[in-house]
Image (cartoon, rainbow, N blue to C red):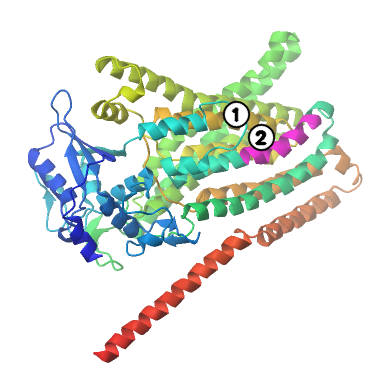
């Protein structure tokens, strides 16, 4: 490896811009000189050994820089980050530069062996791992303190000197992807492999899950239509539908694990080793020594963090939950008012007024969810979690608890306190449809319209160019840096999670829930594709092997759905007729059935393997070969030591 890094110094290759760095206007010259020097410095000197060039704009500003790397540098970086590629024997192995010729499609003159997304991920990794050596401050900014081992890029971001870092779009590849993805109306699968090559595994997995979930909803929708048509007021009929719901919610999640394993093995991320997690950018504390790495980094007392969580965050979340329940009771008062108004007037207008409280409540729920999201992000950041994974877990927990109560508390109250199935059906339909319309507008249509307006203004300012392909590099960078930033798949998974709740918890009362979910998801696929390709900056690729904590969230929802559907079945007149004399026998029977169904659910989850048999064999084979290689290396070392 050392010889490879040295050889890299002698290469003179064409510069290909991959990543854009935007510094704040007025950044001091000595700061820019120091930062760019660290980017191009040799690895041995603590640099990133990348290529960087200033982008001179029409007004002469030099606060934007383009970063690239030579093909050899990218190959060495691929080994550093542990990318997994396909070999000539069709197996998937971790890439190493020394064995590069054993990998499929590799050639010294083939600079497309690594996808552009992989190249940009490598550059991002190298930039984030630029660390201070002997510097105690950022040159030109004495108040911006540094210490050995501190991430330079993260410090520049927190001080506002560095505005943003983002990867450039490949206009030709994006044009091809747009056409195959949403440029024509077709019935078929999404080009997930192409999406993965362009946007990375995390986004490709989201679209894969969205597509799979949409197809999985079709059986529920097909069965739900005749239930809606022929059994609208006959609640005895929904016993079979609820029973099917229980099996469906378990099977689809277990099958998804297998499909996910197949995709991520093909993409190589199933085999990627989890790297040691660095402190997140917002983490702060007293400078100390990490006992694991031996490096200097901020140290923060876990006791202080626990105090903040349990004495501030937890009470705040409980207060928000109480407020949500208070708003729910106001909604029921409005429902009663609308019902009284309808009974007094008996007109078409009064019939329409019956839906107004539910619509208002659905809008209020969406507003409360978004406001609470900002509060949860602030609180979780204030808790000062050291690792990004810990931060995300606490944020997801806060948001899911509030969203679950906010969206479903009224339905539980109607079903199990008021015992009003007609109102439950009306409320479920209104909440589901209204939330879907609001999400489509807020997440896709509004951002697209705003971006289109901004793009028109930019084009007028830049000589009124007619097509995207006419844009020069300067104009492309100026357009993209003003585009919105995609903050990840959190909100997208949250929307699917709530939709899964509407379908699995109470859809036996309103069988058309799955139908509306399918229709929404079909438009969601196209609107999200449009959003990724035309509204937001290109996000950095992030390798991942699964959908993470969301898998657990969906499985938890499916367990809750077993309980709710069993209770709904127990409340049906058909079941009540079997126990005319003893309600206690009915309760005990429902509890027994619920426990049996949960047992069947967990048995099914255990019996259905998470990975297909062929992938299990391939993974075991790779593990065996790794152990054998390690044994040979140990033997060779022992032999050398004995000879000495």
Q: For residue 156, what is the image quadrant?
A: top left
Q: Is residue 237 visible?
A: yes
At 21% from the left and 65% from the top, the residue drawn is 3
Q: Are marks 1 and 2 in contact (CB under 8 Å)?
A: no
Q: Main secondary structure of the magenta part?
A: helix
Q: Is residue 286 magenta?
A: no
Q: Which residues are magenta?
A: 213-227
Q: Eyeballing the image, is 97 above or below 319?
A: below
Residue under label 1, please give it: 186
Q: Secondary structure at mark 2?
A: helix
Q: Which mark is residue 411?
A: 2
Q: Eyeballing the image, is 450 above or below 608?
A: above
Q: For residue 500, what is the image quadrant?
A: top right
Q: Where residue 591 sits in the image (x, y, percent)?
A: 77, 53
Quadrant into which the C terminus falls? bottom left
Q: Where residue 273 sits in the image (x, y, percent)?
A: 42, 61
At 69% from the left and 9% from the top, the residue drawn is 349
Q: Is residue 640 left or right of residue 196?
A: left
Foreground pick, 594 / 111: 111
Q: For residue 164, what is the image quadrant?
A: top left
Q: Where residue 509 sits in the image (x, y, percent)?
A: 75, 34
Question: Crowding near pointer 1: few (<14 within 10 Å), some, many (20+)?
Answer: few
At 42% from the left and 51% from the top, the residue drawn is 543
Q: Secondary structure at mark 1?
A: loop
Foreground pick, 589 / 235: 235
Chain-order first, disc 1 or disc 2: 1
């Amino acid at each position: 490896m050392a010889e490879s890094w040295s050889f890299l110094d002698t290469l003179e290759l064409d510069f290909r811009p991959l990543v854009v760095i935007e510094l704040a206007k007025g950044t001091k010259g000595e700061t820019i000189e120091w930062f760019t020097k660290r980017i191009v410095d040799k690895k041995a000197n603590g640099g990133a050994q990348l290529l960087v060039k200033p982008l001179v704009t029409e007004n002469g500003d030099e606060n934007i820089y383009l970063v690239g790397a030579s093909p050899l540098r990218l190959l060495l970086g691929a080994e550093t980050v542990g990318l997994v590629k396909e070999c000539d024997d069709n197996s998937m192995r971790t890439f190493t530069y020394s064995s590069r010729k054993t990998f499929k499609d590799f050639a010294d003159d083939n600079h497309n062996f690594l996808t552009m997304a992989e190249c940009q991920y490598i550059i991002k990794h190298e930039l984030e791992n630029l660390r201070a050596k002997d510097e105690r401050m950022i040159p030109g900014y004495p108040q911006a303190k540094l210490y050995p081992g501190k991430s330079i890029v993260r410090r520049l971001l927190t001080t506002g000197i560095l505005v943003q870092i983002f990867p450039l779009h490949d206009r030709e590849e994006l044009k091809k992807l747009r056409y195959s993805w949403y440029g024509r109306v077709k019935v078929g699968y999404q080009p997930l492999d192409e999406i993965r090559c362009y946007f990375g595994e995390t986004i490709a997995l989201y679209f894969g899950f969205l597509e799979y979930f949409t197809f999985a909803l079709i059986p529920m929708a097909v069965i739900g239509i005749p239930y809606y048509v022929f059994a609208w007021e006959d609640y005895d009929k929904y016993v079979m539908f609820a029973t099917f719901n229980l099996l469906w919610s378990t099977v689809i999640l277990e099958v998804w694990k297998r499909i996910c394993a197949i995709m991520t093995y093909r993409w190589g991320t199933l085999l990627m080793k989890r790297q040691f997690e660095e402190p997140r950018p917002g983490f702060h504390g007293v400078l100390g020594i990490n006992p694991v790495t031996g490096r200097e980094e901020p140290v923060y007392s876990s006791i202080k963090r626990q105090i903040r969580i349990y004495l501030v965050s937890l009470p705040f979340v409980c207060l928000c939950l109480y407020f949500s329940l208070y708003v729910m009771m106001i909604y029921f008062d409005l429902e009663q008012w609308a019902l009284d108004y309808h009974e007094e007037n008996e007109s078409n207008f009064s019939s329409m007024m019956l839906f107004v409280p539910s619509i208002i409540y659905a809008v209020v729920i969406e507003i409360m969810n978004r406001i609470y999201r900002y509060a949860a992000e602030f609180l979780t950041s204030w808790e000062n979690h050291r690792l990004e994974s810990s931060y995300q877990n606490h944020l997801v927990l806060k948001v899911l608890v509030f969203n679950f109560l906010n969206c479903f508390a009224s339905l539980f109250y109607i079903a199990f306190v008021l015992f009003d199935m007609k109102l439950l059906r009306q409320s479920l339909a209104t909440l589901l449809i209204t939330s879907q319309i609001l999400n489509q507008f807020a997440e896709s249509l509004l951002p697209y319209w705003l971006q289109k307006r901004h793009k028109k203004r930019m084009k007028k300012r830049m000589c009124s160019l007619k097509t995207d392909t006419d844009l020069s590099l300067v104009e492309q960078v100026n357009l993209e840096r003003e585009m919105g930033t995609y903050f990840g798949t959190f909100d997208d998974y949250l929307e699917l999670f709530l939709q899964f709740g509407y379908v699995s918890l109470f859809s036996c009362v309103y069988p058309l829930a799955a139908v509306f979910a399918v229709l929404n998801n079909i438009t969601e696929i196209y609107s999200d594709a449009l959003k990724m390709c035309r509204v937001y900056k290109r996000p950095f690729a992030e390798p991942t092997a699964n959908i993470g904590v969301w898998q657990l969230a969906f499985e938890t929802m499916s367990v809750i759905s077993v309980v709710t559907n069993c209770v709904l079945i127990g409340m049906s007149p058909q079941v009540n007729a079997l126990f005319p004399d003893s309600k206690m026998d009915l309760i005990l029977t429902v509890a027994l059935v619920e426990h049996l169904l949960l047992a069947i659910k967990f048995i099914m989850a255990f019996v259905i393997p998470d990975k297909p048999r062929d992938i299990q064999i391939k993974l075991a084979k790779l593990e065996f070969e790794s152990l054998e290689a390690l044994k040979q290396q140990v033997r060779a070392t022992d032999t050398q030591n004995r000879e000495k």
